[in-house]
Image (tube, rainbow, N blue to C red):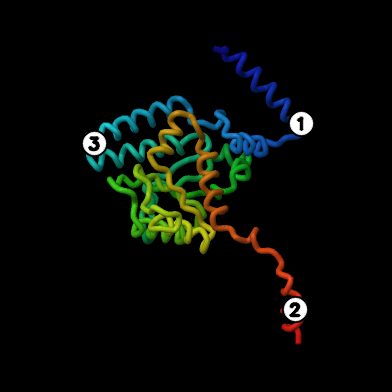
Amino acid sequence: MENKSAQVNRIVQCAESLESGNINIYEFVSFLGEKNSSVLCIPDDKIQIITQAITRIEAGNCSKGEKGALLEKITRAIFDNTIFSCVRNCRTSTNEIDLYVQWTEIARLTHLQIAFPYFGDSFLCECKNYGEPVGVTYVGKFCSLLLCSNVSLGVMISWNGVTGRGKWDASKGLIKKFALKENRYIVVLDKNDLKQLSRKETNIFSLIGNKVQALKLDIDYSTYLKSHPAESEFARNGEK
């Protein structure tokens, strides 16, 4: 394993290479996110917290309250770091938010919000420890919370995901319709996503970015709208 001095030298060399190539930091980090680089994976000490929490949940012998606390512990391990900061149980006048997540000062100074614009300036994160997939009623409340909180991204961590067999059915359908109508996105992280993160098979930037992109591509029909040959005729008739 490299000693500290060798690691510092390697970092300096990388920084000099970026400088000579006129690549700014957010272009570089954005590239790492797109390539699902392990550089952006969760640190090992946080991975250990997530893995232990997942193991306890899967053992099936914890109460509902304990499971909720474990899910929040996982969420904090993912989002509370040098890049993001979390405020627990931040209240609005109409509701309660489990976690309000925003960029740290370091992240803002390095313009990481430009590299990952789908996070916005801040976003909301809620942990749901239901024994079943989260239904339409609660997803609808989360949609309302996003609107009154004036954020464009909501992350729902639900061990069993949300309801809906088809793309436009139940909770899954509501999430898509909400995205279409409001240009706001609810991303659901289930147990499979959490396990991928714990195994460093993905990083949170790629995971959320891909889910937001999937929502956009699934509902964005504008690319299929082409000029019809009869449009000019309608335009001339309209001028008469």
Q: Position of residue 44 (x, y in %)?
A: 46, 25
Task: Say which residue appears at 30% left-offset and 48% top-offset.
Answer: 132
Q: Residues within 10 Å of mark 1 (few under 14, many from 20)?
A: few
Query: In the picture shown, does residue 180 fall above or below 106?
Result: below
Q: Are circles 1 and 3 on residues that touch, CB within 8 Å?
A: no
Quadrant of the drawing holding the N terminus:
top right
- First in sequence, mark 1 or 3: give its number: 1
Task: Give the residue type at disc 2.
Answer: Glu
Q: Residue 92, which numbered label?
A: none
Task: Give the residue type at disc 3.
Answer: Cys
Q: Residue 233, which numbered label?
A: 2
Of circles 2 and 1, the one toward us is 2
Q: CA separation, marks 3 and 2? A: 69 Å
Dot 2 lies on which element? helix
Residue found at the very far front of the displayed protein: 229
- First in sequence, mark 2 or 1: give its number: 1
Q: Residue 62, which numbered label?
A: 3
Q: CA separation, marks 2 and 1? A: 52 Å
Q: Which residue is labeled 1 in the image?
A: 21
Q: In this rendered view, identify the residue nearer to me: 25 or 214.
A: 214
Q: Is residue 61 left or right of residue 41?
A: left
Quarter of the view holding residue 206:
top right
Task: Say which residue appears at 51% left-offset and 58% top-offset.
Answer: 179
Q: Position of residue 102 (x, y in %)?
A: 50, 45
